[in-house]
Amino acid sequence: QTVVTQEPSFSVSPGGTVTLTCGLSSGSVSTSFYPSWYQQTPGQAPRTLIYNTNTRSSGVPDRFSGSILGNKAALTITGAQADDESHYYCAMYVGSDSWVFGGGTKLTVL
Amino acid sequence: QVQLVQSGAEVKKPGASVKVSCQASGYIFTAYYIHWVRQAPGQGLEWMGWINPKSGGTSYAQRFQGRVTMTRDTSISTAFMEVSGVKSDDAAVYYCARDYKNSFEEWGQGTLVTVSS
C-alpha cells in the first residue's frame, strides 16, 4: 500500500516564501506520478492549484508553482498572503488505475 | 461553465446503503472520468475510485472494493456512488471530481453522509 507523505503543518510570514513537499513511501516522486496540489479551507470543497507536476489550474495566481525537488513533489508559494492560510493536499497517480492523497499540510500565515 | 452538482445530505442507519449523485453540466459528460473522494470529519481526502462515463468501466481503491459501486446514467449526465452496509466510519463528506490529466480538476460541492442509529 503506497503512502503519500506531507508535512503536517508549516508556517510562513506574510510576504514570505514557503515550499511544501509530497513524498512517496515506496521511493522517489517523478513526473510519471502526475503530482497535483489542492487547497482547501474549512467547509469548502478543494480547489485545484497544480496538476501534472507544474501546470497551474485556470485562475490560479502565478505565485503558486509546482516542481520536483530532489525525490519529492513540491508546491512553492511566493509572497504568501493571509488568505493562503489553508490546508494543502497533494495527490499522485500510483499506477493500476489508482490515486492516493497525502495527509495534508496545514499552512499558517503569521 | 463546468459544474458538478451533487445530491443533498443523507442520514443513514448502520447497515443501510447510501447513494450519492453527481450531475455534470457545461461539458461532454462522456469525455472525462469522474472520481469519488471522501473526507471524514477533521480528516484528509481519501480517493475512493473512478468511473469512465463513456464505457461504465470502474476502478476502486482496494479498501472499498466489494462495498462501493459507481454507476452512471449518460441520458442525464449523472454519476452515482453507492456505499452498502454503512458503518460509523463511513460518515464523511463525499465529493465527485472530474478528471483532467490524472488530476481532480473540477469538484462538486460535496454531500454530507451521517451514520446514526
Image (cartoon, rainbow, N blue to C red):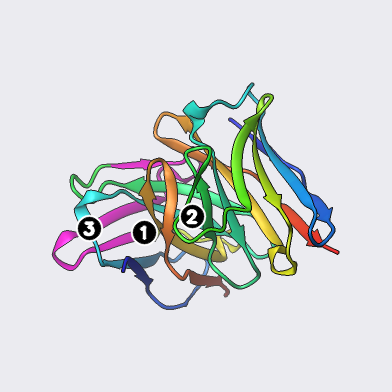
Q: Which residue is mark 2?
A: B37
Is residue B68 in the magenta section?
A: yes
User: Is residue A21 in sight in this rendering?
Assistant: yes
Q: Amino acid at mark 1?
A: Met
Q: Depth check: B75 or B82 in front?
A: B75
Q: Amino acid at mark 2?
A: Val
> For the point 13% across and 64% down, which residue is it?
B75
Q: Quadrant of the C terminus of chain B?
A: bottom right
Dot 1 surroundings within 10 Å: few (below 14), some, or many (20 or more)?
many
Q: Depth check: A13 or B88 in front?
A: A13
User: Is residue B43 in sight in this rendering?
Assistant: no
Q: Earlier in the sequence, mark 3 or mark 1?
A: 3
Q: Which residue is mark 1?
A: B81
Q: Which residue is mark 3?
A: B29
Q: Is residue B116 left or right of residue B95?
A: right
Where are the magenta residues, as a range? B58-80
Image vertical order of residue A67 relative to residue B66, above or below: above
Callout 1–callout 2 Cβ contact below 8 Å? no
Q: Say which chain tag 3 marks.
A: B
